Image: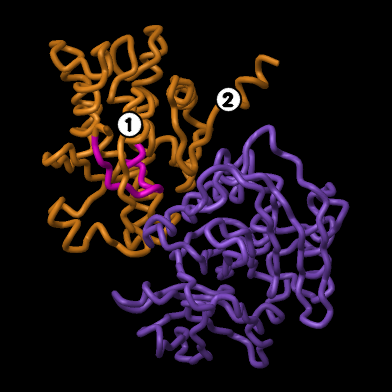
Amino acid sequence: MTAFTLYNYVLSGNCYKIRLMAGILDVKYDTVAVDFYPGFEHRQNHMLALNPAGTLPVMTIGEQVLTDTQAMLAWIALNHDPSGTWYPAADPMLGPLVQQWLAFSGRLTNSAGLAGLHSMLNWPIDGEAARRAAIKDLRELELHLTDRVFEGKTWLVGDHPTIADIACFPYVALSPDAGLDHDGYPAIRNWLYAVRSLPGFVTMPGIHHLHELREGADG
Amino acid sequence: MSLEYAKNDWYAVADIFCLRDGPRRTRLLETDITVTGPAEDATVTDDQGNRYPVQLKFDHVWTTLGDSPRPLFDIPEGDEEGRRRVPCGVVRVNCSPLRAVENFLDIAHFPFVHTDILGSEPHTEVSPYKVAIREESDEVWATQVKFFQPQAAKSAGDGIVTDYDYRVPAPTVAVLYKTCPPKPEAQDVIAIFVQPVSETVSDVWPWMALYDDASTFSEMAQFQHEIFVQDRSILENQRPVKLPLDPKMEIPTRADMTSVAYRRWLKKRGAFYGALRDGA
Protein backbone atom coordinates (compact mmCIF):
# COMPACT_ATOMS: atom_id res chain seq x y z
CA MET A 1 0.00 0.00 0.00
CA THR A 2 1.53 3.27 -1.09
CA ALA A 3 0.77 6.65 0.50
CA PHE A 4 0.16 8.67 -2.66
CA THR A 5 0.72 8.91 -6.42
CA LEU A 6 3.12 11.48 -7.83
CA TYR A 7 2.72 12.76 -11.40
CA ASN A 8 6.38 13.22 -12.00
CA TYR A 9 8.99 14.64 -14.37
CA VAL A 10 12.50 13.55 -13.53
CA LEU A 11 14.21 16.88 -14.29
CA SER A 12 11.71 19.06 -12.40
CA GLY A 13 13.01 20.60 -9.17
CA ASN A 14 9.47 20.88 -7.83
CA CYS A 15 8.82 17.17 -8.43
CA TYR A 16 12.16 16.45 -6.78
CA LYS A 17 11.03 18.27 -3.59
CA ILE A 18 8.36 15.60 -3.16
CA ARG A 19 10.71 12.71 -3.95
CA LEU A 20 13.25 14.13 -1.49
CA MET A 21 10.77 14.64 1.35
CA ALA A 22 9.33 11.17 0.80
CA GLY A 23 12.84 9.71 0.74
CA ILE A 24 13.83 11.34 4.02
CA LEU A 25 10.62 10.30 5.80
CA ASP A 26 10.71 6.86 4.15
CA VAL A 27 7.27 7.22 2.57
CA LYS A 28 6.43 4.81 -0.27
CA TYR A 29 4.58 6.18 -3.29
CA ASP A 30 3.74 5.45 -6.92
CA THR A 31 4.85 7.60 -9.83
CA VAL A 32 3.28 8.37 -13.17
CA ALA A 33 5.84 9.69 -15.66
CA VAL A 34 4.51 12.82 -17.38
CA ASP A 35 6.11 13.86 -20.66
CA PHE A 36 6.76 17.48 -19.58
CA TYR A 37 9.48 17.71 -22.21
CA PRO A 38 9.50 17.31 -25.18
CA GLY A 39 5.78 16.39 -25.19
CA PHE A 40 4.35 19.19 -22.94
CA GLU A 41 1.91 16.56 -21.66
CA HIS A 42 1.19 18.67 -18.54
CA ARG A 43 -0.69 21.06 -20.80
CA GLN A 44 -2.81 18.36 -22.43
CA ASN A 45 -6.47 17.91 -21.52
CA HIS A 46 -6.15 14.83 -19.34
CA MET A 47 -3.53 16.57 -17.18
CA LEU A 48 -5.42 19.90 -17.16
CA ALA A 49 -8.46 17.99 -15.87
CA LEU A 50 -6.33 16.98 -12.89
CA ASN A 51 -4.57 20.34 -12.49
CA PRO A 52 -6.07 23.31 -14.35
CA ALA A 53 -2.90 25.31 -13.70
CA GLY A 54 -0.99 22.93 -15.97
CA THR A 55 1.97 22.62 -13.62
CA LEU A 56 3.88 19.68 -12.18
CA PRO A 57 3.98 17.92 -9.81
CA VAL A 58 0.46 16.74 -9.13
CA MET A 59 -0.20 14.48 -6.15
CA THR A 60 -3.20 12.29 -5.57
CA ILE A 61 -4.08 10.75 -2.23
CA GLY A 62 -6.99 8.47 -3.06
CA GLU A 63 -9.57 10.84 -4.54
CA GLN A 64 -7.93 13.95 -3.13
CA VAL A 65 -5.77 15.98 -5.53
CA LEU A 66 -3.01 18.40 -4.48
CA THR A 67 -1.57 20.71 -7.12
CA ASP A 68 0.68 23.01 -5.07
CA THR A 69 4.16 21.68 -4.30
CA GLN A 70 4.42 23.34 -0.90
CA ALA A 71 0.98 21.98 0.09
CA MET A 72 2.24 18.50 -0.85
CA LEU A 73 5.26 18.92 1.42
CA ALA A 74 2.93 19.97 4.23
CA TRP A 75 0.74 16.92 3.62
CA ILE A 76 3.69 14.52 3.75
CA ALA A 77 5.05 16.08 6.95
CA LEU A 78 1.69 16.27 8.73
CA ASN A 79 0.88 12.65 7.87
CA HIS A 80 4.24 10.89 7.94
CA ASP A 81 6.50 12.70 10.40
CA PRO A 82 5.83 11.35 13.91
CA SER A 83 8.39 13.79 15.37
CA GLY A 84 6.38 16.78 14.15
CA THR A 85 9.58 18.75 13.55
CA TRP A 86 9.45 18.88 9.75
CA TYR A 87 6.39 21.11 9.76
CA PRO A 88 5.87 22.83 13.13
CA ALA A 89 2.56 24.27 11.92
CA ALA A 90 1.12 24.95 15.38
CA ASP A 91 4.17 26.79 16.73
CA PRO A 92 3.22 30.48 16.90
CA MET A 93 6.55 31.68 15.47
CA LEU A 94 8.11 28.72 13.65
CA GLY A 95 4.88 27.94 11.76
CA PRO A 96 4.66 31.40 10.14
CA LEU A 97 8.42 31.44 9.42
CA VAL A 98 8.13 28.13 7.61
CA GLN A 99 5.27 29.66 5.57
CA GLN A 100 7.47 32.61 4.70
CA TRP A 101 10.28 30.42 3.36
CA LEU A 102 7.80 28.25 1.49
CA ALA A 103 6.70 31.42 -0.29
CA PHE A 104 10.35 32.27 -0.96
CA SER A 105 10.77 28.85 -2.58
CA GLY A 106 8.03 29.87 -5.03
CA ARG A 107 10.15 32.89 -5.99
CA LEU A 108 13.11 30.56 -6.57
CA THR A 109 11.01 28.48 -8.99
CA ASN A 110 10.35 31.62 -11.01
CA SER A 111 13.94 32.87 -10.94
CA ALA A 112 16.58 30.13 -10.67
CA GLY A 113 14.14 27.46 -11.89
CA LEU A 114 13.23 29.39 -15.04
CA ALA A 115 16.87 30.32 -15.63
CA GLY A 116 17.67 26.60 -15.59
CA LEU A 117 14.91 25.78 -18.08
CA HIS A 118 16.19 28.54 -20.33
CA SER A 119 19.80 27.33 -20.17
CA MET A 120 19.08 23.65 -20.57
CA LEU A 121 15.92 23.31 -22.65
CA ASN A 122 15.96 26.65 -24.52
CA TRP A 123 12.74 27.72 -22.75
CA PRO A 124 11.26 30.69 -24.62
CA ILE A 125 11.67 33.29 -21.86
CA ASP A 126 14.00 36.20 -21.07
CA GLY A 127 16.87 34.14 -19.66
CA GLU A 128 18.92 37.15 -18.57
CA ALA A 129 16.01 38.57 -16.57
CA ALA A 130 15.53 35.19 -14.87
CA ARG A 131 19.23 35.03 -14.05
CA ARG A 132 19.22 38.55 -12.59
CA ALA A 133 16.23 37.66 -10.41
CA ALA A 134 17.95 34.45 -9.34
CA ILE A 135 21.09 36.32 -8.24
CA LYS A 136 18.91 38.65 -6.15
CA ASP A 137 17.22 35.65 -4.51
CA LEU A 138 20.51 33.83 -3.91
CA ARG A 139 21.95 36.94 -2.22
CA GLU A 140 18.91 37.24 0.03
CA LEU A 141 19.22 33.59 1.01
CA GLU A 142 22.98 33.92 1.56
CA LEU A 143 22.41 36.84 3.92
CA HIS A 144 19.81 34.94 5.92
CA LEU A 145 21.96 31.81 6.18
CA THR A 146 24.98 33.90 7.20
CA ASP A 147 22.91 35.40 10.03
CA ARG A 148 21.87 31.89 11.00
CA VAL A 149 25.52 30.76 11.16
CA PHE A 150 26.24 33.66 13.54
CA GLU A 151 23.38 32.36 15.70
CA GLY A 152 24.94 28.90 15.65
CA LYS A 153 22.11 27.49 13.53
CA THR A 154 22.16 25.32 10.41
CA TRP A 155 18.61 25.41 9.04
CA LEU A 156 16.39 28.13 7.62
CA VAL A 157 14.03 28.06 10.60
CA GLY A 158 14.36 26.76 14.18
CA ASP A 159 16.65 23.95 15.34
CA HIS A 160 15.56 21.23 12.92
CA PRO A 161 15.34 20.88 9.16
CA THR A 162 11.81 21.69 7.97
CA ILE A 163 9.81 21.49 4.76
CA ALA A 164 11.08 25.05 4.14
CA ASP A 165 14.63 23.70 3.70
CA ILE A 166 13.36 21.01 1.34
CA ALA A 167 11.31 23.55 -0.64
CA CYS A 168 14.22 25.95 -1.10
CA PHE A 169 16.90 23.34 -1.73
CA PRO A 170 16.43 22.10 -5.34
CA TYR A 171 16.56 25.28 -7.41
CA VAL A 172 19.43 26.64 -5.32
CA ALA A 173 21.37 23.39 -5.67
CA LEU A 174 20.66 23.30 -9.43
CA SER A 175 21.56 26.93 -10.13
CA PRO A 176 24.99 26.04 -11.64
CA ASP A 177 22.99 24.45 -14.48
CA ALA A 178 21.96 28.00 -15.34
CA GLY A 179 25.52 29.30 -15.10
CA LEU A 180 25.00 30.58 -11.53
CA ASP A 181 27.75 28.88 -9.54
CA HIS A 182 27.96 28.80 -5.75
CA ASP A 183 31.49 30.15 -5.35
CA GLY A 184 30.33 33.48 -3.99
CA TYR A 185 27.84 32.00 -1.52
CA PRO A 186 29.70 30.22 1.30
CA ALA A 187 26.73 30.06 3.68
CA ILE A 188 24.57 28.57 0.93
CA ARG A 189 27.28 26.00 0.22
CA ASN A 190 27.33 24.90 3.87
CA TRP A 191 23.55 24.66 3.96
CA LEU A 192 23.44 22.63 0.72
CA TYR A 193 25.98 20.29 2.29
CA ALA A 194 23.81 19.95 5.40
CA VAL A 195 20.73 19.05 3.33
CA ARG A 196 22.71 16.53 1.29
CA SER A 197 23.92 14.94 4.56
CA LEU A 198 20.38 14.19 5.75
CA PRO A 199 19.65 10.46 6.24
CA GLY A 200 17.43 9.22 3.39
CA PHE A 201 18.64 11.93 1.00
CA VAL A 202 17.94 11.10 -2.65
CA THR A 203 19.54 12.58 -5.75
CA MET A 204 18.30 14.01 -9.02
CA PRO A 205 20.24 14.71 -12.22
CA GLY A 206 22.51 17.64 -11.35
CA ILE A 207 22.43 16.96 -7.58
CA HIS A 208 24.79 14.24 -6.48
CA HIS A 209 25.33 12.15 -3.36
CA LEU A 210 27.89 13.21 -0.81
CA HIS A 211 28.95 9.82 0.45
CA GLU A 212 32.11 9.49 -1.63
CA LEU A 213 33.32 12.85 -0.38
CA ARG A 214 32.54 11.99 3.23
CA GLU A 215 34.31 8.65 3.03
CA GLY A 216 37.28 10.39 1.42
CA ALA A 217 37.37 12.99 4.16
CA ASP A 218 37.36 10.34 6.87
CA GLY A 219 39.83 8.04 5.18
CA MET B 1 39.18 25.08 -35.99
CA SER B 2 37.97 23.84 -39.29
CA LEU B 3 34.61 25.35 -39.98
CA GLU B 4 34.72 24.53 -43.69
CA TYR B 5 35.13 20.82 -42.97
CA ALA B 6 32.31 20.85 -40.42
CA LYS B 7 29.94 22.59 -42.83
CA ASN B 8 29.94 19.53 -45.08
CA ASP B 9 28.42 17.22 -42.48
CA TRP B 10 24.68 16.86 -41.83
CA TYR B 11 23.24 17.92 -38.44
CA ALA B 12 19.96 17.36 -36.62
CA VAL B 13 18.35 20.77 -36.06
CA ALA B 14 14.79 19.79 -35.07
CA ASP B 15 12.76 16.71 -34.17
CA ILE B 16 9.32 15.68 -35.35
CA PHE B 17 7.68 17.30 -32.27
CA CYS B 18 9.32 20.67 -31.87
CA LEU B 19 8.01 22.31 -35.06
CA ARG B 20 4.35 21.84 -34.14
CA ASP B 21 4.11 25.17 -32.32
CA GLY B 22 5.94 27.13 -34.98
CA PRO B 23 9.39 27.53 -36.50
CA ARG B 24 12.53 26.84 -34.49
CA ARG B 25 15.05 29.68 -34.38
CA THR B 26 18.43 28.15 -33.71
CA ARG B 27 22.12 28.36 -34.49
CA LEU B 28 24.30 25.88 -36.35
CA LEU B 29 28.06 26.32 -36.69
CA GLU B 30 27.68 29.98 -35.67
CA THR B 31 25.06 30.63 -38.36
CA ASP B 32 21.56 31.68 -37.26
CA ILE B 33 18.95 29.55 -39.00
CA THR B 34 15.20 29.06 -38.96
CA VAL B 35 13.70 25.60 -39.25
CA THR B 36 10.09 25.73 -40.40
CA GLY B 37 7.74 22.77 -40.27
CA PRO B 38 5.98 20.49 -40.80
CA ALA B 39 8.79 18.04 -40.10
CA GLU B 40 7.88 15.95 -43.18
CA ASP B 41 8.38 18.97 -45.42
CA ALA B 42 10.66 21.24 -43.41
CA THR B 43 12.70 24.15 -44.71
CA VAL B 44 15.92 25.57 -43.30
CA THR B 45 16.88 29.15 -44.11
CA ASP B 46 19.39 31.65 -42.77
CA ASP B 47 18.79 35.35 -42.13
CA GLN B 48 20.06 36.27 -45.61
CA GLY B 49 17.36 34.09 -47.15
CA ASN B 50 19.69 31.25 -48.21
CA ARG B 51 17.91 27.93 -48.21
CA TYR B 52 19.73 24.77 -47.15
CA PRO B 53 19.09 21.11 -48.03
CA VAL B 54 16.89 19.12 -45.67
CA GLN B 55 16.21 15.47 -45.00
CA LEU B 56 14.02 13.78 -42.41
CA LYS B 57 15.76 10.82 -40.83
CA PHE B 58 15.68 9.10 -37.42
CA ASP B 59 12.68 11.29 -36.46
CA HIS B 60 14.81 14.42 -36.83
CA VAL B 61 15.17 17.15 -39.45
CA TRP B 62 18.76 17.22 -40.77
CA THR B 63 20.49 19.98 -42.67
CA THR B 64 23.95 20.88 -43.97
CA LEU B 65 25.51 24.26 -44.65
CA GLY B 66 28.18 22.97 -47.05
CA ASP B 67 28.39 22.92 -50.84
CA SER B 68 29.54 19.29 -51.14
CA PRO B 69 28.16 17.45 -48.12
CA ARG B 70 29.33 13.98 -47.19
CA PRO B 71 26.39 11.52 -47.20
CA LEU B 72 24.32 11.17 -44.04
CA PHE B 73 25.03 7.81 -42.36
CA ASP B 74 22.36 5.16 -41.82
CA ILE B 75 21.11 3.30 -38.75
CA PRO B 76 19.28 0.38 -40.40
CA GLU B 77 18.25 -1.19 -37.08
CA GLY B 78 16.10 1.86 -36.39
CA ASP B 79 13.60 0.81 -39.06
CA GLU B 80 13.10 -2.74 -37.75
CA GLU B 81 9.51 -3.63 -37.07
CA GLY B 82 8.47 -3.68 -33.43
CA ARG B 83 10.98 -1.09 -32.27
CA ARG B 84 9.67 1.99 -30.52
CA ARG B 85 11.44 5.13 -31.60
CA VAL B 86 11.87 7.79 -28.97
CA PRO B 87 13.13 11.24 -29.94
CA CYS B 88 13.96 12.82 -26.55
CA GLY B 89 13.98 16.53 -27.42
CA VAL B 90 17.02 18.78 -27.18
CA VAL B 91 19.27 19.65 -24.24
CA ARG B 92 21.65 22.63 -24.37
CA VAL B 93 25.11 21.93 -22.95
CA ASN B 94 27.91 24.47 -22.75
CA CYS B 95 30.60 22.14 -24.01
CA SER B 96 32.41 21.26 -27.21
CA PRO B 97 30.31 19.02 -29.48
CA LEU B 98 33.26 16.62 -29.54
CA ARG B 99 33.36 16.44 -25.72
CA ALA B 100 29.66 15.50 -25.75
CA VAL B 101 30.34 12.63 -28.17
CA GLU B 102 33.40 11.46 -26.25
CA ASN B 103 31.47 11.37 -22.97
CA PHE B 104 28.80 9.22 -24.63
CA LEU B 105 31.50 6.74 -25.66
CA ASP B 106 32.89 6.38 -22.13
CA ILE B 107 31.93 3.51 -19.84
CA ALA B 108 34.27 4.05 -16.91
CA HIS B 109 32.24 6.94 -15.47
CA PHE B 110 29.01 4.93 -15.15
CA PRO B 111 29.36 3.88 -11.47
CA PHE B 112 30.26 7.40 -10.38
CA VAL B 113 27.93 9.59 -12.45
CA HIS B 114 25.02 7.22 -13.17
CA THR B 115 25.18 5.55 -9.76
CA ASP B 116 22.79 2.63 -9.26
CA ILE B 117 21.49 2.94 -12.82
CA LEU B 118 24.22 2.32 -15.40
CA GLY B 119 26.85 1.30 -12.85
CA SER B 120 27.58 0.89 -9.17
CA GLU B 121 30.52 0.50 -6.86
CA PRO B 122 32.42 -1.78 -6.46
CA HIS B 123 31.68 -2.99 -10.03
CA THR B 124 33.92 -0.39 -11.63
CA GLU B 125 36.25 -2.48 -13.78
CA VAL B 126 36.16 -1.96 -17.54
CA SER B 127 37.17 -5.27 -19.11
CA PRO B 128 39.34 -5.19 -22.25
CA TYR B 129 37.36 -4.55 -25.43
CA LYS B 130 38.07 -4.12 -29.14
CA VAL B 131 38.41 -0.84 -30.97
CA ALA B 132 38.82 -0.33 -34.69
CA ILE B 133 38.56 2.36 -37.32
CA ARG B 134 36.67 0.54 -40.05
CA GLU B 135 38.23 1.53 -43.33
CA GLU B 136 35.32 0.63 -45.61
CA SER B 137 32.81 2.82 -43.76
CA ASP B 138 35.36 5.21 -42.20
CA GLU B 139 33.73 4.86 -38.79
CA VAL B 140 35.05 4.29 -35.26
CA TRP B 141 33.75 1.08 -33.66
CA ALA B 142 34.23 -0.29 -30.15
CA THR B 143 32.93 -3.83 -29.70
CA GLN B 144 32.70 -6.52 -27.02
CA VAL B 145 32.32 -3.92 -24.30
CA LYS B 146 30.89 -5.55 -21.17
CA PHE B 147 29.76 -3.81 -18.01
CA PHE B 148 27.75 -4.73 -14.92
CA GLN B 149 24.69 -2.53 -14.62
CA PRO B 150 22.13 -2.32 -11.80
CA GLN B 151 19.39 -0.97 -14.12
CA ALA B 152 20.56 -1.06 -17.73
CA ALA B 153 17.28 0.10 -19.27
CA LYS B 154 13.78 1.06 -18.23
CA SER B 155 12.81 -2.50 -19.18
CA ALA B 156 15.54 -4.14 -17.04
CA GLY B 157 14.60 -5.49 -13.63
CA ASP B 158 17.64 -6.58 -11.60
CA GLY B 159 21.28 -5.97 -12.43
CA ILE B 160 22.74 -7.58 -15.56
CA VAL B 161 26.02 -7.67 -17.43
CA THR B 162 25.31 -5.50 -20.45
CA ASP B 163 27.07 -5.91 -23.81
CA TYR B 164 27.74 -2.73 -25.72
CA ASP B 165 28.92 -1.85 -29.20
CA TYR B 166 29.74 1.78 -29.88
CA ARG B 167 29.88 3.49 -33.21
CA VAL B 168 30.91 6.97 -34.38
CA PRO B 169 29.56 7.47 -37.91
CA ALA B 170 30.19 11.25 -38.03
CA PRO B 171 32.24 13.63 -35.85
CA THR B 172 29.25 14.84 -33.82
CA VAL B 173 27.19 11.64 -33.70
CA ALA B 174 27.56 8.59 -31.44
CA VAL B 175 25.44 5.45 -31.60
CA LEU B 176 25.42 2.59 -29.13
CA TYR B 177 23.94 -0.87 -29.40
CA LYS B 178 23.30 -2.63 -26.10
CA THR B 179 21.73 -5.73 -24.61
CA CYS B 180 17.96 -5.49 -24.85
CA PRO B 181 16.60 -6.97 -21.59
CA PRO B 182 13.20 -8.23 -22.90
CA LYS B 183 14.59 -9.46 -26.28
CA PRO B 184 18.04 -11.05 -25.82
CA GLU B 185 18.54 -11.77 -29.55
CA ALA B 186 18.26 -8.07 -30.42
CA GLN B 187 20.05 -4.91 -29.35
CA ASP B 188 18.60 -1.60 -28.23
CA VAL B 189 19.86 1.41 -30.19
CA ILE B 190 20.59 4.71 -28.47
CA ALA B 191 22.20 7.69 -30.16
CA ILE B 192 23.06 11.31 -29.61
CA PHE B 193 22.91 13.71 -32.51
CA VAL B 194 24.92 16.79 -31.53
CA GLN B 195 24.04 20.09 -33.18
CA PRO B 196 27.19 22.22 -32.87
CA VAL B 197 25.91 25.70 -32.04
CA SER B 198 29.53 26.84 -31.80
CA GLU B 199 32.81 25.20 -30.85
CA THR B 200 31.88 25.44 -27.17
CA VAL B 201 28.06 25.20 -27.16
CA SER B 202 26.12 22.08 -28.13
CA ASP B 203 22.44 21.29 -28.59
CA VAL B 204 22.18 17.56 -28.02
CA TRP B 205 19.32 15.46 -29.42
CA PRO B 206 19.18 12.02 -27.77
CA TRP B 207 17.29 9.38 -29.76
CA MET B 208 16.40 5.76 -29.03
CA ALA B 209 14.96 2.79 -30.92
CA LEU B 210 14.02 0.15 -28.36
CA TYR B 211 12.16 -3.09 -27.94
CA ASP B 212 10.08 -2.27 -24.88
CA ASP B 213 6.36 -3.03 -24.70
CA ALA B 214 5.94 -2.32 -21.01
CA SER B 215 7.09 1.28 -20.58
CA THR B 216 5.21 4.40 -21.64
CA PHE B 217 6.84 6.90 -24.00
CA SER B 218 7.20 9.28 -21.05
CA GLU B 219 8.99 6.67 -18.95
CA MET B 220 11.44 5.83 -21.73
CA ALA B 221 12.17 9.48 -22.54
CA GLN B 222 12.59 10.39 -18.85
CA PHE B 223 15.01 7.51 -18.34
CA GLN B 224 17.17 8.99 -21.09
CA HIS B 225 16.77 12.57 -19.73
CA GLU B 226 17.85 11.41 -16.30
CA ILE B 227 20.99 9.77 -17.68
CA PHE B 228 21.88 12.60 -20.00
CA VAL B 229 21.42 15.43 -17.52
CA GLN B 230 23.54 13.55 -14.97
CA ASP B 231 26.35 14.05 -17.50
CA ARG B 232 25.58 17.68 -18.21
CA SER B 233 27.21 19.37 -15.21
CA ILE B 234 30.32 17.27 -15.69
CA LEU B 235 30.57 18.13 -19.38
CA GLU B 236 30.22 21.83 -18.59
CA ASN B 237 33.12 21.65 -16.15
CA GLN B 238 35.65 19.86 -18.35
CA ARG B 239 38.80 21.85 -19.10
CA PRO B 240 40.06 22.68 -21.59
CA VAL B 241 36.60 23.27 -23.00
CA LYS B 242 37.65 22.08 -26.48
CA LEU B 243 38.69 18.47 -26.99
CA PRO B 244 42.49 18.18 -27.05
CA LEU B 245 43.80 16.02 -29.89
CA ASP B 246 47.40 16.07 -28.70
CA PRO B 247 47.78 12.79 -26.77
CA LYS B 248 50.09 14.46 -24.27
CA MET B 249 47.39 16.82 -23.00
CA GLU B 250 45.04 14.29 -21.38
CA ILE B 251 46.57 10.99 -20.32
CA PRO B 252 44.36 8.07 -21.36
CA THR B 253 44.05 4.70 -19.60
CA ARG B 254 43.18 1.32 -21.13
CA ALA B 255 39.49 1.99 -20.56
CA ASP B 256 39.78 5.06 -22.81
CA MET B 257 40.70 3.17 -25.99
CA THR B 258 37.52 4.31 -27.74
CA SER B 259 38.30 7.91 -26.95
CA VAL B 260 41.87 7.51 -28.18
CA ALA B 261 40.61 6.08 -31.48
CA TYR B 262 37.97 8.81 -31.77
CA ARG B 263 40.55 11.54 -31.33
CA ARG B 264 42.90 9.91 -33.87
CA TRP B 265 40.05 9.56 -36.32
CA LEU B 266 39.09 13.24 -35.94
CA LYS B 267 42.71 14.21 -36.53
CA LYS B 268 43.03 12.00 -39.60
CA ARG B 269 39.87 13.50 -41.11
CA GLY B 270 40.74 17.08 -40.26
CA ALA B 271 37.55 17.34 -38.19
CA PHE B 272 38.92 20.05 -35.92
CA TYR B 273 35.75 22.03 -35.16
CA GLY B 274 35.45 21.92 -31.34
CA ALA B 275 38.97 20.49 -30.98
CA LEU B 276 42.21 21.82 -29.59
CA ARG B 277 44.82 20.91 -32.20
CA ASP B 278 48.11 21.35 -30.40
CA GLY B 279 49.39 21.88 -26.89
CA ALA B 280 48.31 25.53 -26.90
Residue at image position (40%, 18%) is: A146
Could you tell me if residue B32 is visible in this image? no
Give B48 or A43, whichever is nearer the viewer: A43
Indicate the position of residue A105 as horizontal and vertical percent values.
Answer: 28, 34
Q: How much space separates mark 1 and mark 2, taking CA atoms?
A: 23 Å
Q: Secondary structure at mark 2?
A: helix
As drawn, the chain in purple is B
Q: How is the image coloured?
A: by chain
C-beta proximity under 8 Å, tags 1 and 2: no
Magenta span: A4-16
Q: Secondary structure at mark 1?
A: loop
Indicate the position of residue B219 as horizontal and vertical percent values.
Answer: 40, 55
Indicate the position of residue B49 as horizontal and vertical percent values.
Answer: 45, 91
As drawn, the chain in orange is A
Q: Which mark is residue A211?
A: 2
Residue at image position (53%, 46%) is: B230
Residue at image position (41%, 13%) is: A149
Question: Which residue is farthest right?
Answer: B248
Indicate the position of residue B76 as horizontal and vertical percent values.
Answer: 60, 80
Q: What kind of residue is marked 1?
A: Lys
Mark with earlier residue (1, 2): 1
Q: Residues within 10 Å of mark 1 (few under 14, many from 20)?
A: few
Residue that numbered label 1 is attached to: A28
Task: Please tell me in which quadrant of the rendered image residue B70 appears.
Answer: bottom right
Instruction: Verify whether residue B37 appears in magenta.
Output: no
Above/below status of B17 relative to B97: below
Marks 1 and 2 share the same chain: yes
Figure quadrant of the C terminus of chain A? top right
Task: Please tell me in which quadrant of the rendered image residue A34 appears.
Answer: bottom left
Give B278 or A214, whichever is nearer the viewer: A214
